[in-house]
Structures are given as C-alpha cells and as structure tokens.
Amino acid sequence: MLNIKGLKVKLEDEDKQILKGVDLEVPAGAVHAIMGPNGSGKSTLSYVLSGRDGYEVTGGEATLDDENLLELEAEERAAAGLFLAFQYPVEIPGVGNMTFLRTAVNAQRKARGQDEMSATEFLKVIRAKAKTLKIDADMLKRPVNVGFSGGEKKRNEILQMAMLEPKMCILDETDSGLDVDAMKLVSEGVNALRDKGRSFLVITHYQRLLDHIKPDVVHIMANGRIVKSGGPELALEVEHNGYADILAEMA
Amino acid sequence: MGLPDTDVTGRSLPQSGAWAKAAREDAQARLHAMGLPGRRDEYWKYTRPDTLIADDPAPAAVFHTDEAPLYDGIDRVKVVFIDGVFDAAASDPLELAGVEIERLETAAQTDIHWAKGLYGTLETNGQTPVARPLAALNTAYATDGVLIRVTGKADKPVSLIYRHENDASDAILHHVVKLEAGADLTLLENGPAAARFNKVLEVDVADGAAFHHVRAQGRDHERQAVTHIFARLGRESTFKSFTMTVNGRLTRNECVIELTGDDAVAHVAGAAMGDGEFHHDDTVFITHDAVNCESRQVFKKVLRNGATGVFQGKILVKPDAQKTDGYQKSQSLLLDDDAQFYAKPELEIYADDVICSHGSTTGAIDDEALFYLRSRGVPEVLATDLLVLAFLAEAIDEIEDEAIAEDVVSRLDAWLQRRRD
Ligand SMILES: Nc1ncnc2c1ncn2[C@@H]1O[C@H](COP(=O)(O)OP(=O)(O)O)[C@@H](O)[C@H]1O
Ligand SMILES: [Mg+2]
C-alpha cells in the first residue's frame, strides 16, 4: 500500500535536513505505529506525504499503490486515498463543518469520476457517522474546528476520515490531549474503519493508544530515520524504559 | 440665483414644479460654489474622479448571464429602471399597504409635495464637514427616481431593479425614503443601471422606525458608479444597509449617517470582490449626535489581479453623544501581489463616556487553512473560494433577513463557480 524508500527532506527556506532517509512499507490492511522522541520528524513525514508546502524532497521516493505521491498535488493525494488526521487540526472561521465535508466528499468523488452525493444522502450518512462519534448537530453546523475542544477536534478528524473512506490513513498524535473516554471513542472510530483494503499509520507518543488500536508493527523514529522496527512489544519497551536504551543501542 | 441654466457640468436643470425647482436650483448653486472634485481633493486621494465627472461616460458593455437574477424567489414590489429611466411596463403596480411609492419625475411637476424638506435636504446636511459635489450634482440634475413614504410595516420589500441596456448610458437617479414613526421597510436594489451611474438615496428614519437595505451593484465589468446614501435617524430607530459589489471598473459608495435621536442603531456593511480592472471605494461618515446610539461598520474586500480597494471611514462623536458605541472594521483579502488596498479609518470624539473601536487589516489567504482543505481533497481554486466566502461572511451576516442573505450567498457562489469553470 504505502511504500517509502530512502526519503530525505529538508526545509525549503532553511538549510535544515529533517528526514535523513526514511524507509517504511505498510502493506494493505496493516496497522503500523511510529513512536519516537519529540522533534524526530514524525509530523514532517506525515506532512510531506500529504503534500504540504515548505519542504523540499532531496532524495528517495514515496508511493501509494504504485502512484508516485510526491508528484501529486495535496488534493490529488487525497483523491488517491491518502488521509492525514492532523496533530493540530486547523480552525477555519466562516466555513461550516458540514459544507466543508460535503465539498470534500464530492470533490474526491468528482476526481475519481464518480457521481456527486446528493444533499439528502450526504445528510443521512453524516448523521449516522457523527452519532457513533458523539458529534452533535451543533458541531456539524459550526465553523470547522472553531471553538471545538481538543477532544472535539480529534473526533472531528475521525469523522472526516469516516466520511472520506481513504485507503491509507495517517494519524498524527490523535491521542494527544484526549481523556480516557475520548480516546476510547476515537479508537472505536478508527477500529470500525479497519478493513483488509485499508491501512493505518499511527503516530503516537504513548503506548496506551496502542492498547486500543492494536498495531501489527511498531517503528521507532529518531533524528529523521526509522531506527528500529518490531512487534507490539516494542511499544511496551518504550513505555517502560523510554527511548534512551534504543538510541544507545543504535549509537 | 443669477446663475445660468447650465453650470460646471454643462447640464441643464430638468423641468420642475415649485418644490423641486427650489431644491434643484439650490443644489445647482451649491455645486457651483463647491466645484467638482479634483485630483488634489483630500477626499479623493485614493480614487480618481475624472471619469465620474467627464462630460460623457466611458462606454460599458452590457454583461449577459443566464443565471437567475438576485432576489428571484423573494416576494417584492418591483420597480424597474432601464438605463436610468423608470419602466412602468416592466414594473409591478406601485402599490403596497402602508407604503406610498411615487415616481420622482411625476412628483417633481407638482408645486407641493411631502418630499419638500427632504429631497436635497439630507444631502445638504451631509455636505459638512466634507463636501460631496457629486451628490449635489445628483440633486440638481436627477430626472428620475422614487419617492417612498412608509406609514406602516410593509409586508414585503420594495425592490429597485436597474437594468443596463445601452453601452453609453449615463444615469442619474435620486430616491427619497421617509419612514414615519414606527414604520418598517426593506428596500432592495440590484443591477448595474447604466454605463455610468450617479445615485443618491436619502432616508429619513423617524422615531422607532426601521429601515433595511440590501443592494447588489451590477456585474458589468466596465460600468462606473458613484452612489451616496444620506440617512437621518430618530430616537430608537434602526438603519441597516448592506452592499455587495462584484465587478465594475469604478465604484465609489459614500454613506453619510446622522444619529440624531437617542438609542438609535445604524449598521453599514459591504462585501466587494474585484478582479483586474476594478476600483472600489467605500467612504463612510457616521455622526453620533444623541445619547446611547450604536453604529457598526463592517467592510470586506477580496482583491486580485491589480484590483484596488479603498476604505475611508469616520466616526464623529459630538460632545453630547454620551454612551456611544461605535465599531468600525475594514478588511481586505489580497489574493496576489498585484492587488492593493488603502484604508483611512478615523475617529473624532468629543464626548467622554464612549466606546469606539476601529480595525483595518490587509491579509492573504491563510496557508494553513488552505492546506487543510486541500488535504481533504478540495482542489486549490475551490478551497480558495471557500475561504473567500468565509472571509466575506461577517459582512453578509449583517443582512437580517435570512432568505435574502442566503440569496446573496448563492449569487456569490454561482459567480465564483462560473469563474472556476
Ligand atoms: N516549518 C518548520 N520550520 C522550522 N523547523 C521545523 C519545521 N518543521 C519541522 N521543523 C523541525 O523539524 C524537526 C522535526 O519536527 P517534527 O516533524 O514536528 O517532529 P515530531 O513530530 O517528531 O515531534 C524539529 O526539530 C522541528 O523543529
Ligand atoms: Mg509531531
């Protein structure tokens, strides 16, 4: 599904190399986790994959089912099935949440040559999905993420994911700032989407999210590289001993 | 008056009965004394008046569209002007309960009329402390318009529709609206009117009355317009005016409001979108001359490809206007490096117990928001348009009637979509 080889990325405006050769392969239907200290480049990786400006790829490649992601515009990557649940979802005053989602759903359908979803059908679908995420009608009407609590913003990300039905979902610290109940809700939302044709890359600091969303593989990222990969037990190791041992082992 | 029939403009006064003759001659004399605006005029620093005062208008092609016209689904009394001339056949009967609607051309032939003491009077009051020669010109030479007297609560809007059919038309219209105590009217306006359009709207809002005004200035790319609103507000009265402007080579909208009765409320808002050869000027002057009044200005402009926006807004608070609440916001969104925006916000306050604020900003599209939308699959141009509408929303929110506001948004939407396709 997602294939990253030797990806090197620097900041466009600064002489600062952030990703120094990332190798990662997430097969269809798999859940992979990335853990790692702050500043190791996890968010940068997710932004570069989804097409945000401000970065320069200096080497390597990234493909989604044989499509060269790095050549596509951000919206084309989305239409190709890539989705990023933001670490910091953006507030957009003046754009209604519902309008935003309907525009996005229909834009993707159009890009794939499918018919647009009618207003009634859209309403029916979104209401059902919002309900399971405990997102009320008011949150749907309000401007995108404006005045949402941290937890509401993250649930809103999962709602978008559920509506857009991407095949490759990247979740960047979706658990940060969530209390136990909200984390359960979000994890259930994610688990409901698990499917043999859909893959997940879950970026997190904490092992506890991985209790809810069980990964097949855990990667440790440090200083712009994947330095170690293993089974779910790797997350437990990090939880108990921190990153120091692993980093020392690599040195 | 000792003046010739024609003055600086080379025009001659229309035929009138006693009351209109007096008002027109007075305006002609005032215009003669103040002269036409020149490039060195401080009040015309950002907008060149040349083409507005030239003998002949620059031709403007008529813009054809198959989109539904604005306010299409709204029940209203239609009053149609074609190139500045009232068209009875295209209009509805000028009948509405609690409202008298009369054509200026007809009323001006009488010797006595209720509009005496209003026609040109509010305009005259609005000439100090800043001269507005093109408004005096209008009072002197306007040949058409409507006089509306509202005695009750109108149950539907009066809708002035300005069609432009002749590429070289030069229209001067003057309307007077008098709302008696407790009366209520919504006035709609739309359409380009002419190649060059000079319009004055005088509104007298008596105690407890409410006036709502929503206008859309026509989309003909080359049309030019100078408009003035002069409003006088009585005690506990309400005046709310919103203007949408898309296209047009030159538009100067002046709005002069005097709050003369305690507890009155005046809101003026504008949403303008310009691309290329587009110059849009909002010039507002609000005078607080009574206690506990509220005024609010919200002006938004979206500019690209060399389009220019101007905002000159002043709040004057007289010594006795305590408890004034004055708010002024003017923002522009520049979609590229070629667009420009000039703002001159002013406060002049002589009372001490007053809250007044003003803010003027110029910004670009928020990159974070744009990426967020694109990351959900919304193409860049569409994402930009969503953010443009979002930017304008605060001005559009000033329209109280939801159906009208929705109609305005859907027109903007359709216009943006036409550009995308
Ligand atoms: N736009 C940027 N400007 C400056 N530094 C940046 C920018 N984006 C990322 N960085 C730097 O790159 C490194 C990796 O950041 P990030 O990808 O956010 O790490 P993580 O998500 O793993 O905490 C950090 O040192 C961060 O400060
Ligand atoms: Mg991060």
Image (spheres, coloured by chain):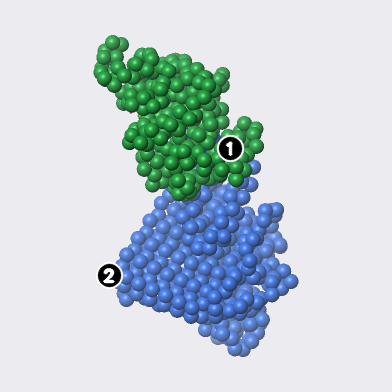
Chain colours: A green, B blue
Question: Which residue is denoted by mark 1 in the rendering?
Answer: A107
Quadrant hosting residue A239: top left
- CB atoms at circles 1 and 2 under 8 Å apart? no
Q: Position of residue B126 (x, y in %)?
A: 46, 74
Left or right: A226 as drawn, with respect to B137 = left
Q: Position of residue B264 (x, y in %)?
A: 41, 73
User: What is the quadrant of the C terminus of chain A in the image?
Assistant: top left
Q: Kindly identify the amino acid type of the residue bearing the numbered disc 2.
A: Asp
Q: Nearer the viewer, residue B399 or A17?
A: B399
Left or right: B10 as drawn, with respect to B257 = right
Question: Which residue is denoted by mark 2 in the rendering?
Answer: B352
Q: Kindly identify the amino acid type of the residue bearing the numbered disc 1.
A: Ala
Q: Is residue B272 above or below residue B119?
A: above
Q: Nearer the viewer, residue B126 or B1?
A: B126
Quadrant hosting residue A116: top right
Q: Position of residue A170 (x, y in %)?
A: 45, 27
Query: Residue under mark 2: which chain is it in?
Result: B
Q: Position of residue B156 (x, y in %)?
A: 59, 70
Q: Nearer the viewer, residue B124 or B68?
A: B68
